[in-house]
Image (spheres, helix red, strand yellow):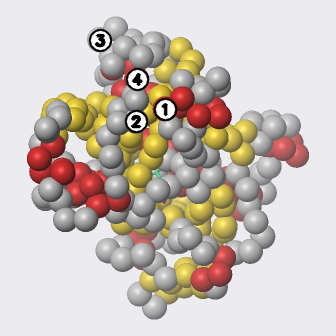
Amino acid sequence: MSTRIAFLKGHGTENDFVIVPDPENAVDLPPASVAALCDRRAGIGGDGLLHVVRSAAHPEARHLAAEAEWFMDYRNGDGSVAEMCGNGVRVFARYLQHAGYATEGDIAIATRGGVKAVHIAKTVSGGDPGAGDITVGMGRALLPGDGVTVSVGGRSWPARNVNMGNPHAVAFVDDLDHAGDLFTAPPFSPASVYPDGVNVEFVADRGPRHVALRVHERGAGETRSCGTGACAVAVAAARRDGVDPRVTGTPVTYTVDVPGGTLVITERPDGEIEMTGPAVIVAEGVIESEWLENLPR
Ligand SMILES: N[C@@H](CCC[C@H](N)C(=O)O)C(=O)O
């Protein structure tokens, strides 16, 4: 018997997601189904998929159920699993608000990268509902010393290794066009630094504590934004600029322009990073379960 599977479509600074609400974890979503749903021609289309599950109903999140009712089971557009998605957490929170599971204020959301504290700001009457009004506590960045070299089209750059729960290589460039078309993942060496692959950010300066990035995401290709990437970039830029709030005791804020908008990243004296940006629900519908069930596996 076929069942009706609801979906929504949302984005955060144009990093877009298929959202599948599934509180009791009843929908089977093998990698091939996720890739088909995220396909922009034959499916719904998205950089990734947000599987919305009650923590208590998911084996990977059951132990977090007392801290966070909801688990973001995030998948990349190619069907692979990732530890964290910064834009995804904001869109996930917006979905919970949209569905009546959350209200303006604070909510905790479980992810594979731990429980994230999210604040949904009060909507200004008559204001843009997609405005940059969701703040996520993204945790601390790890900066293992081992950097890599990233190459594109005959040019190479040293890149900073930053872990935001998921891996990033941050390369500062004079011109974002030097990153090329980013149709394929930029080669890096040594390969041993990122055995599970990496998200690569190319960063150019725009002004004091203001940078712009382009990103090639692991499992998705070039995207219009990456929240964890923007955090990695802000921390790498701060260290390059000789700024470390853990030493000075003063928070530091970077504005990070992405092709799909702007994210504001603050690192506090305790090393905790906060990201603020928009999240928008754009559509909702029903997946043809017959199509989903009959996909080649
Ligand atoms: N777009 C995301 C990151 C999604 C996961 C990433 N592609 C990975 O494989 O680590 C974000 O906004 O952080």
In this view, the residue in front, 50 or 183, is 50
Neighbour class for label 2 at 10 Å: few (<14), some, many (≥20)? some
Q: Quadrant of residue 6?
A: top left
Q: Which mark is residue 25?
A: 2
Q: Quadrant of residue 91?
A: top left
* Distance from mark 2 CB to nearest ligand 1 atom below 8 Å: no
Q: Amino acid at mark 1?
A: Ala
Residue under numbered circle 1? 57
Marks 2 and 1, the one that precedes in the sequence: 2
Q: Amino acid at mark 3?
A: Gly
In this view, the residue in front, 206 or 157, is 157
Marks 2 and 4, the one that precedes in the sequence: 2
Whether pointer 2 and pointer 4 mark residues with C-beta atoms closer than 8 Å, the reply is no
Which quadrant is the N terminus positioned in? top left
Which quadrant is the C terminus positioned in? bottom left
Q: CA distance from mark 2 to mark 4?
A: 16 Å
Marks 1 and 4, the one that precedes in the sequence: 1
Whether pointer 3 and pointer 2 mark residues with C-beta atoms closer than 8 Å, the reply is no
Whether pointer 2 and pointer 1 mark residues with C-beta atoms closer than 8 Å, the reply is yes
Residue under numbered circle 3? 126
Residue under numbered circle 4? 96
Q: Classify 296 as above or below 282.
A: below
* Distance from mark 1 CB to nearest ligand 1 atom below 8 Å: no
- Name the residue furthest bottom: 154
Neighbour class for label 1 at 10 Å: few (<14), some, many (≥20)? some
Q: CA distance from mark 3 to mark 4?
A: 21 Å
Neighbour class for label 4 at 10 Å: few (<14), some, many (≥20)? some
Q: Tell me the residue at 11%/47% (across/down).
A: 290
Whether pointer 1 and pointer 4 mark residues with C-beta atoms closer than 8 Å, the reply is no
